[in-house]
Amino acid sequence: MTKQFHNQSLQVSARLANLFRKLSEIGSLKRLLKRSLPLVFAISFATVLLLDNLPSVAQFPPSATIVQPELSLPEILLPEILQPDIIQPEILQPRKLPRQEIRGVWMSTNDFNILKTRSGAKDAVTKLRQLNFNTIYPVVWNSGYTKFPSYTAKRAGIPFFFKGADGHDVLADLIEQSHRQGLLVLPWFEFGFMVPETSELALNHPEWLTQKRDGSLTSNSAAGEVAWLNPFHPQVQQFIQNLVLEVVSQYDVDGIQFDDHMSLPRDFGYDKYTVALYTQETENPPPANSADEAWVKWRADKITMFMSQLNQAIKARKPYAIFSVSPNYYDHAYKLQLQDWLNWVRLSIVDELVMQVYGNDLARFTSKINRPEIIETKQYIPTGIGIMAGLRNRPVSMQQIQSQVRAAQEYGLGVTFFYYESLWNYAQESVELRQAGFKDLFPRFARRSRI
């Protein structure tokens, strides 16, 4: 009976939407909406009551920590009514965005020596443009520090070190240089909720950290031993959101990218705040088993809610901004990092996805980029694969890079390389051979646009 009411309510909304669209064609929409708003609100309210108790792949649990951007009631309700074609019986389908081939590169802290001079940044952007790249992801949050002057960071007791050689703003300069040559810039919040235990942020705000069941505060990562900000704590959420909105508001960015560290290792979440919140909402303490299915889902859903809030806050400041994420493959991301990025796609939180797939084995690489969640995602948003171009002490051959890029291209996927300087500076092949190899992969420029 509940499902029957659910379907009937959707059908009513769809019929109303069709009626409104037809009348708008003859100039009557405004008058009709004005007269019909009470009826629309009543139907929407009844629909919400019916749906609130139904299971859904993309439903949010309640939370008192989310601060939604201010929207008037018509702005919230009318889009759902005027777009019935995106409604399916059990889930809202993600919106389809224009297909654009991602040809990106991450600019990490290792690239700062190049970016700290205006001439170095100009030469780097020029070379990328010549090789037909179209997107740059410069790091702006790493190791507990911002790579741009931030009032939010200063207020949290975090010093700022990353000025250009002549005192200039490195991020502003890179954006200007990139836009002159037609490249998009999406600042990259690499560390997400991850911070060094000895960072000023961790030391100044120990109450912001979460912990494991045994009370320990750290885990091992590619960046060494790190602590984790509590993604469920309202002050942590506000801090991260303020950092992001500073970048969105102060710079002419094309979007923002969040890494696989916009997550939480599943062993964490046993701090006093989270335990109390979980107990309050479920009337039970968190399970001792950190892999418990319901406990994993509860935490993952909370992170999903925060990402939704963050998306809305960004779009309120800059509607065209691309909301990008670069997670690990889904099974790993969800089960081990509580990062339910497929649900983010289905909820239209994400405008672009770059899945990290690092490794030497081509068969394993190919199997990961052809998984069902990637096949689904690329139907709706620009989708790419993160490829390792090399590290200072571990170069990657051009042959391996080319085989992985061509495999991605064969499946209709873009690519992003980690990281700029390793494209040709830490390689066994010559710079000329490496650059010729990238030119062969991207023989023509593929322009990208803001959404």
Image: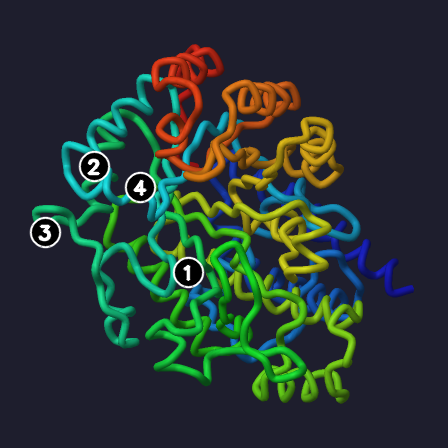
Check disc 4 and report the residue beneath it: 111
Residue 6 position, x and y percent, is 80, 59
Check disc 3 and report the residue beneath it: 167
Check disc 2 and report the residue beneath it: 176
What element does badge 1 sit on? helix
Q: Amino acid at mark 2?
A: Glu
Q: Residue at x 20, y 30 (%)?
A: 122
Tell me if 118 is positioned left or right of 18 in this view: left
Q: CA distance from mark 4 to mark 3?
A: 17 Å
36 to 391, vertically: above or below: below
What element does badge 3 sit on? loop
Quadrant holding the N terminus: bottom right
Q: CA distance from mark 2 to mark 4?
A: 18 Å
Q: CA distance from mark 1 to mark 4?
A: 30 Å
For residue 313, the mark is 1
Q: Amino acid at mark 3?
A: Gly
Quadrant holding the C terminus: top left
